[in-house]
């Protein structure tokens, strides 16, 4: 990509020359998140189905004998492939692509800007003199920003991934295919695409549905608050360089970056996993709204909501708020349900984090290198023009 003397710069090279570190962080984060999303999508689908199926089974007790469809990673893959084909393993890829691009672009941008700001405040606040405290607070700020911005995309992704793909041998059937129709609230939905899901959610549940699970998602900021301070600490120990910092021997440092990515993600996932199950249950549950379609299903919807009805006779959602959701899951499924899909999650999350961080570090290294080369060429050309 570097230019030789006399060459005219392309738009990309001109952008690299004039771009700020903030822009570099946004681009590197977006590319890293996008790459990891595509690579690990099948594992994300399997994890989501394992997390969500407990709620469907518990919802159906007393009405039908719904067997457990998904058992372990291999069994889940077999079931998905048998019923939905290879396409089923990439269900939800659209919102993954749409979600990871802004998520990591926002995250890395806010994270690095927060680090700069908080480091300057170290003269005022003693706690901020410690790098781990700065990294911890920066992770919280970055995580909150990216979560609020992209939560609607993740709700759509979770619903697409957790639904069944066909009627054949499925205990969870499709709904009808009219533009805004959906099954009764006690049976899974069916969305045909990202846009179709957004349209149906808005028309039948309202704008609020796009922020289902936001509270546990924000609670999950504890995850990044563990992961990234740990990553920065381990990367510094293994390589002598901080996150995003450049050096001339990145090829020799890749093992340190890889190790820091793996260990930090395992630590964070193990410590904070239950909130993901709570978030998935809230996101995959449709919000009851008055209407002919809903009223026609009242007879069985009350069963789904545990018999709780609002003042208008509309059953309340089964999962409502973090505390009530935790109590419901524990009462119906026990403590083990909070770790449903954790093995699959580890197999997905660790490679995802590794691909994200390795790609981010590589892109940052490449961008900084190209910027330095471009400046060197321009400086050399300018010096030649000044010679008599």
Image (cartoon, rainbow, N blue to C red):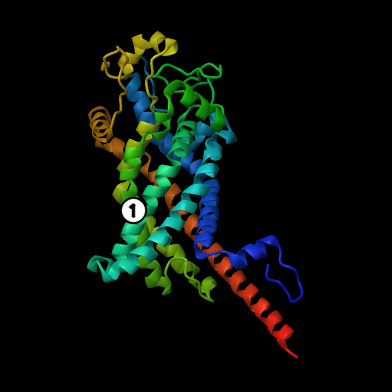
**Label 1: element kind:** helix
Decide which of 145, 345 is in the foreground and name it. Answer: 145
Which image quadrant is residue 83 in?
A: top right
Q: State whether residue 28 is above or below residue 281.
A: below
- Return the residue at label 1: 140
* Count of numbered circles in the view: 1
From the viewer's perspective, tell me whether residue 216 is left or right of residue 294.
left
Picture coordinates of residue 134, whole percent (x, y): 32, 63
Judged from this view, the residue extending furthest toward the bottom is 388
Q: State whether residue 167 is above or below residue 341.
A: above
Picture coordinates of residue 131, whole percent (x, y): 32, 68
Look at the image and tell me whether residue 335 can be seen: yes
Q: State whether residue 213 is above or below residue 251.
A: above
Image quadrant occupied by the C terminus: bottom right
Picture coordinates of residue 191, whole percent (x, y): 52, 26
Residue occupying the point 71% across, 67% down = 9
Image quadrant occupied by the N terminus: bottom right
Picture coordinates of residue 163, whole percent (x, y): 47, 28
Dot 1, how many residues are within 10 Å of its Cα: few (below 14), some (14-19), or many (20+)? many
From the viewer's perspective, tell me whether residue 127 is left or right of residue 284.
left
Residue occupying the point 31% across, 16% down = 315
Look at the image and tell me whether residue 62 can be seen: no
Which image quadrant is residue 194 in?
A: top right
From the viewer's perspective, tell me whether residue 321 is left or right of residue 88.
left
Q: State whether residue 223 is above or below residue 299.
A: below
């Amino acid at each position: 990509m570097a230019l030789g003397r006399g060459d005219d710069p392309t738009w990309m090279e001109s952008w690299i020359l004039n771009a700020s570190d903030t822009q570099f962080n946004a681009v590197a984060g977006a590319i890293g998140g996008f790459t990891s999303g595509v690579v690990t999508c099948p594992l994300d689908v399997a994890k989501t189905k394992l997390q969500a199926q407990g709620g469907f089974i518990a919802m159906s007790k007393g009405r039908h004998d719904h067997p457990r469809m998904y058992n372990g990673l291999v069994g889940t893959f077999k079931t998905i492939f048998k019923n939905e084909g290879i396409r089923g393993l990439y269900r939800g890829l659209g919102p993954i692509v749409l979600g990871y691009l802004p998520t990591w672009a926002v995250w890395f941008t806010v994270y690095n800007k927060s680090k700069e700001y908080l480091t300057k405040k170290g003269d005022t606040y003693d706690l901020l003199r410690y790098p781990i405290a700065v990294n911890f607070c920066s992770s919280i700020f970055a995580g909150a920003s990216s979560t609020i911005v992209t939560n609607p995309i993740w709700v759509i992704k979770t619903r697409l991934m957790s639904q069944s793909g066909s009627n054949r041998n499925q205990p969870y059937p499709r709904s009808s295919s009219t533009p805004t129709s959906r099954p009764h609230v006690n049976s899974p939905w069916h969305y045909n695409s990202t846009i179709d899901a957004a349209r149906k959610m808005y028309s039948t549940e309202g704008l609020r549905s796009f922020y289902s699970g936001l509270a546990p998602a924000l609670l999950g900021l504890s995850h990044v608050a563990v992961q990234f301070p740990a990553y920065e600490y381990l990367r510094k120990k293994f390589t002598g360089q901080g996150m995003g910092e450049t050096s001339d021997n990145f090829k020799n440092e890749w093992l340190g970056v890889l190790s820091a990515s793996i260990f930090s993600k395992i630590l964070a996932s193990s410590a904070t996993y239950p909130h993901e199950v709570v978030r998935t249950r809230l996101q995959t549950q449709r919000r009851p709204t008055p209407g002919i379609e809903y009223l026609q299903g009242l007879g069985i919807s009350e069963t789904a909501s545990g018999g709780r009805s609002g003042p208008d006779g509309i059953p309340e959602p089964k999962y409502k708020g973090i505390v009530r959701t935790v109590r419901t899951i524990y009462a119906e499924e026990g403590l083990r349900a909070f770790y449903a899909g954790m093995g699959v999650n580890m197999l997905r999350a660790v490679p995802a984090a590794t691909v994200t961080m390795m790609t981010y570090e590589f892109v940052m290294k490449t961008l900084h290198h190209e910027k330095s080369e471009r400046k060197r060429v321009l400086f050399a050309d300018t010096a030649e023009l000044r010679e008599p």
